[in-house]
Amino acid sequence: PNKDEFISSFKRFSKEYSLPIKVDNKFESTILNSIKAHIALQLFNENIFYRIINQTDPFVNRAILETKK
């Protein structure tokens, strides 16, 4: 499935279960990353989950840059 299919499915799911989740263009990448991380958690382990989540965390990315100086 592509990105648009995942977002559409997530919107349908949240509407079907009356979940108050706002899905707009601003949050699409965050939602997709979170879904990917949670799938990885189910299939693999917490280490992979955090590796995926931390890829987009500005604090973690800045810390990595600072340690490389």
Image: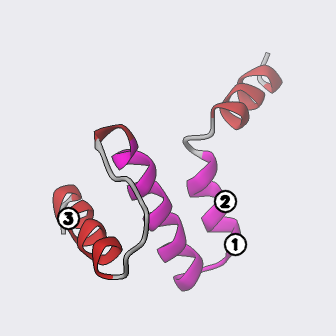
Q: How far is mark 1 from mark 3, CA to CA? A: 27 Å
Q: How far is mark 3 from mark 2, CA to CA? A: 25 Å
Three-letter code, disc 2: Tyr
- Mark 2 touches mark 1? (CB < 8 Å): yes
Q: Secondary structure at mark 1?
A: helix
Three-letter code, disc 3: Ser
Which residue occupies 71% across, 23% down? 65
Q: Which residues are magenta?
A: 27-54
Q: Which coloring applies here? A: secondary structure
Instruction: Report x, y in % for residue 42.
Output: 55, 83
Which residue occupies 74% across, 31% down? 64
Residue underneath mark 2: 50
Which quarter of the image is occupied by the N terminus? bottom left
Crowdedness near tag 3: few (<14), some (14–19) or many (≥20) residues, C-alpha within 10 Å: few
Please indicate whether residue 53 sits to the left or right of residue 64 in the image.
Answer: left
Residue underneath mark 1: 46
Instruction: Report x, y in % for residue 56.
Output: 55, 41
Instruction: Report x, y in % for residue 69.
Output: 79, 15
Crowdedness near tag 1: few (<14), some (14–19) or many (≥20) residues, C-alpha within 10 Å: some
Residue underneath mark 3: 8
